[in-house]
Image (tube, rainbow, N blue to C red):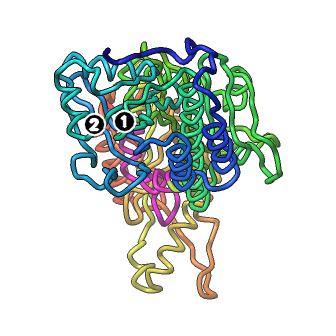
Amino acid sequence: MGINTGNFSNIGTSYEEGSNSAVLSAIARSAEELTAGKGWPDGVNDLLEALGRATGVSRVWIFQTIEITDTHITQNYTFEWAAAPRYKQLDMPMFSMFTNKIDRPEYRETIQSRLRGEWQKMITEQLEPGWLRDSQEIQKIKSMLTIPVMVEDQWWGTLGFDDCERAYDWSDVEIALLKTAGYLISNAVLRDRLSAKRRQFSILKQLTDSSVWEFDFKTGQIWCSPELLHSVPVPTDNIRFSLNKALHMIHPQDRRPLLASARSYLGGDRKGVFRFDLRLFTDCGDLRWVELIGNLRSSEDGKPEQLAGILIDIRKRKREEQRLRKEAVTDPLTGVTNRRLFEHRLQEFIDYSVSVGSPFSLFFLDIDHFKKLNDTYGHTAGDKGLCHLTEVIEGQLRIKDLLARLGGDEFALILPETNHETATAIGERLIRTVESTPFEHDGETHWLTISIGLAVSSGQLTTPARMVETADAALYEAKQKGRNRLAVLTGCAL
C-alpha cells in the first residue's frame, strides 16, 4: 500500500471508527478561541495541542510554504505540538526555512497534490522502498496524515499529524473533522493578515490622510473607505459603487489619462506598483489631489482579479510642487516671469508669428538712472522701485502680453499679434503712466522714468537671438537720445 490521496468532498459518512467527540470538542473550543480572542499565533498553538491530545498522535505540526519554483520548494516549520520531548522537531536546523529540490517523481506528485488541496495519509511500513520511506523511518514516523491549509485558494502550508507509535489508518470521518481544523488555521491566517493591514493603515493614517480601495474585475464594483470622500469627517460605512460612478467622482481632465495609464499597466508585465495622481471630488463637491496606489492580483491563468491599494491625500505635495514650478519660472522679487521662461516663451511666440504671418513685437526696457536710486537711498528703495514698476506696467497690459524681468532693472515685454503702430502706442502709454506714478519709501516720494526699445517683425525675425538683438539695439538708441522715450527698429533694420 502506498499513499492514499483524495478530495475532501469524496470522504464518506461512515462512523465505523466510533465516536470522534474528542476531536470535535477540540475543534469547537479552538474555533471559539481563534475567532473571539487569542487568534494568531497563540490560538494556533492551542489548537495543535488540543488536536494532538484528542487524536493521540505523537506530534502535530504546520509547515508554511514560502516559495515554490519548478525545481525547488522552500518551507518553514512554524508551529509544533509534541506529546513528549523525544518527539520534538521544531528547533532542528534541518526544518528551519529549508529548501528541497523537486527532483523525485514521488515528491513532485506530493507537492502537486497539496497544491490541489488534497489530503494525504500514509503508513510507513506499507510504502514502497525509496526516498519517502527512508525519510519517514529516519524520523521514526510509523504513520502520517497531512492536510493542506488553503488561503484564498492558494496552498499556504500543511497541517500534519505524525504518529511515532502506531501504524494508524485515519478514517474518512476523522479526516473530514481535521480538515475543519485546516479551515480554522486558514481563517486565522486571514485574520492575522487583516490585522497587520489594519495596523499598517493605522500607522499610515497617522502620517497622512488616506483611504483604502479595491476594484473587483469580476463584478466591476469598487469598494473604498470613506476618509477622503468626505470633506467633513463623519462616521460612514465603507462605500461600494460602479466603475462608471467612480469615474464621475474624478476630475474630467484626469479620467482619460487615468484609464490610459491603467490600460498600459494591465497590458504590460503588471509588476511593481500602479501609481497615478488625480483630482477627486468629495461629497461636498470640493476637489482634492490624491495619489492612487495599487497592486494587481491575478488568477492562476494570468487573468486580473483584483486591483487594490490606498488613496493618499497629496494636496500639500501638490502645493509644494506648484510653488517649486512657479519659483523655477518666476522672478522672486517682482513675481513676473524670469529670464528662463521668457526665452522659452519668446520662441513659442516667434513660431506662432511666423506660422500665421501676424505682427509680433518685443519691448526691452529699463529704469533711467536706476543706479543713482540704489546708491542714494539703498537697495531696499531700489527693490521697492522695481516692484512698483512691475505693478504699474502689469496694470496696463492685455491678458496675452508677457512681462519678464531679465535681471537688475532690465525687463522684457512680449506683445503678440501687435503691429508697429499698436506697439508704439502701448509703449508711449507705459512711459507716461510710469512717469506720472510715484512710489513712497521711508517717507519720501520717488519718481521713475523708463526707456523702451521696440523690435517689430511681421514674420521676418525667426530666432530669439535676432529679436533680442534688435530690441536691445533699439533700447540703446532710446538711451542715447535722452532717455524717458521709446525707440523702434524693425526686423529688417539689422
**What label sits on residue 297 in the rendered view?**
none
Residue pictured at 22% horizontal, 35% vertical: 137
Residue topped by disc 1: 65
Q: In which quarter of the view is residue 488 placed?
A: top left
Amino acid identity at mark 2: Thr
- Which one is in front, 227 or 181? 181
Q: In which quarter of the view is residue 464 placed?
A: top left
Amino acid identity at mark 1: Thr
In the picture, measured across the screen, residue 57 lies left or right of residue 343, that is right
Q: Is residue 288 above or below residue 69?
A: below
Q: Is residue 362 above or below residue 143?
A: below
Mark 2 and mark 1 residues within 8 Å of each other at the beta carbon: yes
Kind of element beneath mark 2: strand
Q: Is residue 412 magenta?
A: no
Q: Residues within 10 Å of mark 1 (few under 14, many from 20)?
A: some
- Secondary structure character of the magenta stretch overall: helix
- Percent position (x, y) of residue 402? 51, 44
- Percent position (x, y) of residue 330? 46, 55
- Percent position (x, y) of residue 338? 42, 54
Regarding residue 428, the answer to whether it shows in the image is no
Region in magenta: 321-345
Residue pictured at 36% horizontal, 49% vertical: 340
Which quarter of the image is occupied by the C terminus? Answer: top left
Residue topped by disc 2: 74
- Which one is in front, 359 or 151? 151
